[in-house]
Image: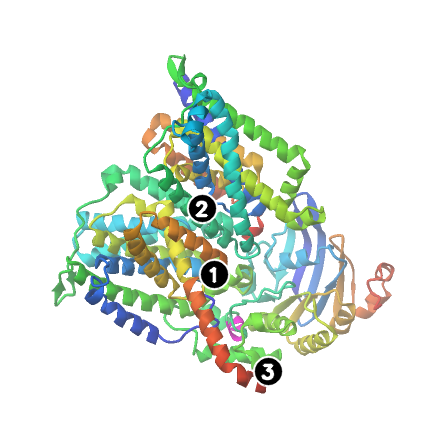
Amino acid sequence: MTGTSSDARLITPTMIAAWLVLATVPLWISKVGLYPYIGVEILIWSIYALAFNLVLGVSGLPSFGHGAFFGIGAYAFGLTQFNVAANLWVCLIGATLAGAVAGLLVGLFIAHRRGIYFALLTIAFGQIFWTISVKSHSITGGEDGLLNIVRLPVNLGVVAFDISDNDSLYYFVLAVFAVVAVVLWRLVNSPYGRLLSAIRQSEVRTAHLGYNVWLYKLSIIVISAGFSGFAGGLFAMAQRSAFPDVMNLAQSGLVVMMTLVGGGLVSFWGPVIGVIVFLTARDVIGAMTNAWMLYFGTMFVLLVLFRPDGIAGAFKLLVERWKARGATPSLSSAPRSG
Amino acid sequence: MALVEAEGVHVRFGDRVVLEEINLSVNEGELHGIMGPNGAGKTTFFNTLTGRVKPNRGRIRLNGEDVAGLSPHAIARKGLARSFQIMTLFNDFTAQENVMVALPAYRARGFDVRRAVAGDASFSDEANEVLASVGLAGKAGISAKLLSYGERRALEIAVALAQRPRVLCLDEPTSGLGTDGTLRLAELIGSLKGKLTIVAVEHDMRFLFSLADRISVIHWGQVVARGTPRELQENAWVKRSNLGSFG
Amino acid sequence: MFDLLPHLLNGLVLGLLLALIALGFMLIVGLMEQINLAHGSLFALGAYLALALTGPNPPLPSDLAALWLQVPLGWRYGIALIVAPCLAGIVGIAVEFCMRRTYGSDPLYGLLLTFGVALVLEEVLRLTWGTRDHVLPIPQSMSGGFIFGDLIWSTYRFYAAGMAAVVIGLVWLFIEKTPYGAMIKAGAHDSEMVRALGVNLSKLRLGVFMLGTMLAAFAGIVVAPIWGIRPHMGVDAVVPAFLIIVLGGVGSFWGAVIASLLVGLAVGVSGAYASEWSLLSMYLLLVAVVSFRARGLFGKKSMLEV
């Protein structure tokens, strides 16, 4: 997030426009040849990527093991449903808490690290959780996964909705996404969020200003892991199952990739753009060739090389150039003061 | 009474002794200069004072309290602020936001996630005041990376001042500045004199001799000479080493 | 106590193999302070290239292929051990050329670039050789087993461990006894000094990256007969290599070797008691060491930490 100033608005016009567009998705998605379920997937992965970007883009901490928190959330959702209570809210809280606790555990070991060691240790911890989930047959079902997870009804006290079909699930997840986006948007623009950005820019300076940098890093790892777990819980419900492969290194790498492709380093919405592009490309290119990862991987390499700021970065540049073109005449007449 | 006191501070990196035995005391309200040749240990002493380097032995007292070995943020909270020789500004922030995050009021709300920073006048007014005090009144909205070199140096000091410190530590504040810039900076630091305690590492002799109340010369990890600028100019060691010449 | 011996021996062999796998990764991270996430794919690439050279269907016109298959397997295997790493080295050169664009910016970009390369390479392997498991044929003289202490031992494992030990020794000689090695060591901590020595840093980086990828491919060939060949074999092998670097400390040759042996022994011995969980022991070892020694066993301060 390189934005030079914080944004005071709780809800921005961009958000409202995005929600309105997203609300129409079930009406036309099948007509353009995509499966309706992809909408659900996009929204859940968007929540996950926004949560992940709290660590990568906002705080500058390169985590390559975030899949663990997502996966733990998924298992926790299923296990809460089977063993505690088959209530949607209880299960989602379970998923969030499980992610956050795992984040705390990992954070205690890595929050004082940065750069190369941070990245390598997140890989290690990701693998630890992955190994445990594969080997603990009796709890997680091992490679077979945790099956028979039910899409629980949305109980709002006075009314309850059934979300077992994809369209109603989509609208539920959209509502959740909207709330999460507002919460994270405010977090990023709050004193806390701006401090995380300061830590990304200079950890040393921030410490000398009297901030306990370690505590800030630990707290954002926990928050990010909690939201990732929450997204994992939604994912388990949408898929009606939880599997260990969302926790492996390649899957953890994918969320980094989506976040970057979209431009998470320069824009709050970058991760969402990245998720939309990635999942749509997967379905569209994947329908034409089974080598889609080859094309997407190549595109990603080119992007890192030539447009490291991602799609949002390229868009910003375009807007700036367009503005600059309009502003050129006035610039030459007014003397610059700086 | 001495506000800052270093007693027998000894720092080793591996088997290399960087600070042999530093004894130093700075009185409240004093501007204390530190000079010495490159590699003499000035910056290491500074880093030890501000908590980046933990001394192997010795005491550092701030207002009578031993702070040696405390972390940088703990020392900063006790009222010690520092600037950096290699500027470490928040480049993606505006000048105003650079100063804002340094304010004690902001620090008190560091974990606040309920309100946005933007439009919060309790931060911006105070930040603008600090910016004005270093001559950056019109630059509040400009991104730090777009400021000129001299402006960035001033911002570096503004960030330290915004912490409302009792002790201000300046690490080579004139580094990279031209004659004009140095003059303006001398004016700024002169205006702060007496209002707060300042410790300044500096290699520009003219600058230091014109501003400092007392000066300590660090060489080979020790304080080899100390006194008022006038005393130092008469000091045999300083004369011999040409440190005091204005050539 | 004696029944532990086979596990210790297995652990030692595993440790040597892990050291071989980690070696190329260690060189690159040491000199360039870049995490090469494509290390695993290059490791797999080496194994697949060797498969192409020694397997029953060499990628040659049919008459040439028939001729090539006349060559004894032992010879073909020996040639594969040299040629396959060289081919992988060419890929390494290409990656390094791409990577130049990322020097000087956040090391994150180098990491992401190599992640992208890994995706592409793995997909190429999958498209060329399919997803099924392959077996790398080895000469008769190296295969089979022998009986020692009432147990059957696989001969090849010991050949593999021996090759690993020899290559580790050669790399050590290269680092310690040649001027290039001195530059690599200097560069690991001080690229300024490398320039002062009059070394062309970009050539040095290219050379080290090439050497690193060649070592990855070589490790792939040596390990393939034991662990099998499949497209994602790289990930399984390379994650322990990452851990070993953290455990041993970035930029330390002996740190990496000792850490490999420790990990091998930990996995081997824990395998005696809970074979299901033996892989976890290496993670626990890492967590234990890193909690007490921030930079691993022999790590020096890295510029990436600042």
Magenta stretch bounds: B96-100
The secondary element bearing badge 2 is classed as helix
Disc 1 + disc 2, Cβ < 8 Å: no
Mark 1 or mark 2: whose residue is earlier in sequence: 2
Residue B231, how many percent across, how many down?
83, 67
Which chain contains the residue that carries disc 1?
A
Q: Which label belongs to residue A307? A: 1
Residue at x 30% of width, y 41% of height: A133
- Report if residue B98 lies within the magenta region: yes
Q: Tag 1: Cα neighbours inside 10 Å, few (<14), some, or many (≥20)? A: some
Q: Quadrant of residue A130?
A: top left
B73 to B212, vertically: above or below? above
Residue A219, how many percent across, how many down?
40, 58
Q: Tag 2: Cα neighbours inside 10 Å, few (<14), some, or many (≥20)? A: many
The residue that label 3 is drawn on is A336
Which chain contains the residue that carries disc 2?
A
The residue that label 2 is drawn on is A121
Report whether residue B1 is seen: no
- Report if residue C210 lies within the magenta region: no
Q: Which label belongs to residue B64? A: none
The N terminus of chain B lies in quadrant? bottom right
